[in-house]
Amino acid sequence: MQGKKLGKLRVAILFGGRSAEHDVSRASAANVLRSLDPERYEPVLVGITRDGRWIAADAGNGRGTGAKELTVPEDGAQFSFVPGGRGRALLSENGREARDMPAIDAVFPVLHGPHGEDGTVQGALELADVPYVGSGVVGSAVSMDKDVAKRLIRDAGLPTSRFVTVTAATMPSYDEAVRAVGTADVFVKPANMGSSVGVSKAGNADEFKAACAQAFRFDRKILIEESVPSVREIECSVLEDGEGLTRASELGEIVPDSKHGFYSYDAKYIDAAGAALVVPAKLSKEQSDTFKTLAIKTFKTLCCEGMARIDFFLSGERILVNEANTLPGFTNISMYPKLWEASGLPQDKLMDVLIEHALARHKRAQAVSVHR
């Protein structure tokens, strides 16, 4: 790897990872790479394998605009940060002594799901004392855990759907679940997963049993939620700048094709016609203002930083906060960047704001003494 180019920030893009959203991350990272201004940034690609190894991934992952996803090498030089090294990184290969590489100025973790979006990688980056994009350990962890997030949202007085959280040891019957959430149709989902992985709808005891088994494949804790009737899925992107000012984007609506029933993983990433993205969403000004206010309140309630996509349900006049995604998708069809583009902020400028936030937050953290 070459030395730092004069005046450019070295930005490490982390992608891949150990979660079921590994492939989505690779697609998001390709879009982030294309969006980084080559006059301002020198990207350093770090692929995380499915078994958790961090591999230098610059070779074969050029800036070409045609690549739909980045490749995670199965072998090659292993990348690691030095704890407390303020961006100092090491490369080691074939058992040889680790060698220094030029320091990293900031990290963009383009990781979705467990072991990336849940505070674990954020904790490692805190220990390395390197600036990074997005929420910190607390905001990442509580937003990723749907059980904890919904409890905080509910306790803050924000509207959310009825739910019950269970483990294998506390599994209710279908009838007990229906009584708990108040609807005969229920949604069953892993507590810690994104991209609708492991989510199923159930309307009878057999479907409920199968849905729970599917959700338990991905987590030891699952949520059972009410099925909201005639629901519209509304999304809002929230962005915090380097000065700590938070703003909400224009709103978008997800309209899944009727054959999917809801915005499933297949509708998002497999079926090209699985869902329509309506930007801006067709809402009254009063509704739009309400969604934006709730989005920022949710962002702050869950201790989010930098960015988050806040997802809502709209059923008649009933507005419900569904969840917050602290590392939302950045694929070419992802709502987070699309909503900012519709709000007058193109993706290359969005990258600038996110990286500036990371640097400013880290600088503020350096001013806080941890010693007596």
Image (cartoon, grey):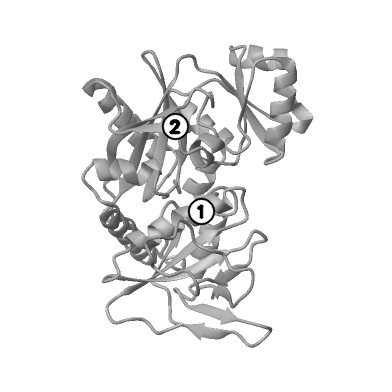
In the drawing, what numbered circle is on residue 208? none
Q: Is residue 128 left or right of residue 252?
A: right
Circle 1 residues within 10 Å: few <14, some 14–19, many ≥20: many
Residue 111 shows in the view = no
Q: Residue 276 or 107: which is nearer the viewer? A: 276
Report helix, strand or loop for mark 1. helix
Q: What residue is shown at x 36% (from left), y 14% (from top)?
A: 317
Please name the residue that numbered disc 2 is placed on.
275
Quarter location, residue 67? bottom left
> Is residue 357 depicted above or below 88 in this figure?
above
* Residue 205, image x, y percentages: 73, 16
> Is residue 230 depicted above or below 158 in this figure?
above
In the drawing, what numbered circle is on residue 25? 1
* Residue 48, image x, y percentages: 58, 63
Name the N-terminal-most of marks 1 and 2: 1
Circle 2 residues within 10 Å: few <14, some 14–19, many ≥20: many
Report helix, strand or loop for mark 2. strand
Question: Nearer the observer, disc 1 or disc 2?
Answer: 2
